Amino acid sequence: MTHSFDAPSGEIAPVSGGFARIARIGRTAIPSDAIVARFGPFEVRLATTKKEIRKAQRLRYEVFFEEGGARPDAAAKLTRRDICPFDSVCDHLLVIDLERTNRFGRPKPKIVGAYRLLRQDVAERHFGFYSQREFDVAALVRRRQGTRFLELGRACVHPRYRSKRVIELLWRGLWLYASRHRIDALIGCASLPGVDPRALALPLSFLRHQAQAPEAWDVRPLPGREANVDILEPQEIDARSALAALPPLIKAYLRVGAKFGAGAVVDAQFGATDVFTIMPLADMEDRYAAYFGAPMERPESVLA
């Protein structure tokens, strides 16, 4: 994710229900229930075809396996895609560079950012939440009956596009999606690089002391999954060093008011240590709620 939420110029054009009703962009028809927003050469919307989901999986493979060093299984190696059974039941929020061209100079739009979104009602009809493999999410759902949860996952941006423009489009698209589906809280795993929790004692201790979720929202690792972490005392933590050790995505979550469950889980396949993120939207800082929910400046209309 990004280090900044400064407002760039451009527009997301929300209409009734928080969505833009797009009939057609160029020669491509877009279903009216897909989120669509434009900012310069970029478009953000939901994937509408299996081909687009495959392209998102290919981007995830490049980011997680080729760049991040995760260990692909046989299917991933063969297809060079990050294939997951949950993809078939999730919505996929995409950022697309519409001005990308091929080597012949012909238009060839490219997916440069992606988020996987799993609503609670969909999860309950299928496999449950993805994060339930590591954390006791069921306990949270029982305590917060009536709360509508949205699980975020597989967030990635192409390394050449890690600018605030692309990140903000993902966040704004996410905000519109959450508003449209009346989501109350965002949840999901966030990862710190490395599988030795002792080496991550500083950032993990910082999250424990500075951003731990209150008891009503806390989520713990499943029995037998919790990593052994030596949590430092508050006086032992250098806040500047701890923040520098956090991945950009977790820092972005912190900026908008996210809290984190106690405990961490090692994900050996992805070479990471996972923490559980909880973001009740009612507790989101007002300045960010107002910013992501409002149109950008200098609108570029893509309405039919």
Image: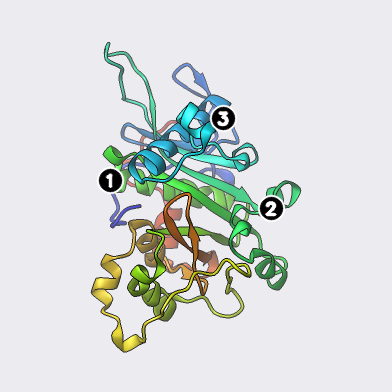
Q: Please say if the residues under marks 3 and 2 sit with CB atoms less than 8 Å apart.
A: no
**SS for callout 3:** loop
Label whose residue precedes the other's in the sequence (3 or 2): 3
**Image location (x, y in percent) of residue 30:** 54, 27
Would residue 130 be seen by someone viewing this image from the given angle? yes
According to the image, label 1 marks what residue? Answer: 163
C-alpha gap between disc 2 and disc 1: 33 Å
Residue under the image location 29 percent in, 65 percent down: 245
Amino acid at the residue labelled 1? Ser
Mark 3 or mark 2: which is in front? 2
**SS for callout 1:** loop
In the rendered structure, the answer to whether residue 296 lies left or right of residue 218 reads left
According to the image, label 3 marks what residue? Answer: 48
In the rendered structure, the answer to whether residue 44 lies left or right of residue 177 reads left
According to the image, label 2 marks what residue? Answer: 128
Amino acid at the residue labelled 2? Gly
Residue under the image location 55 percent in, 60 percent down: 187
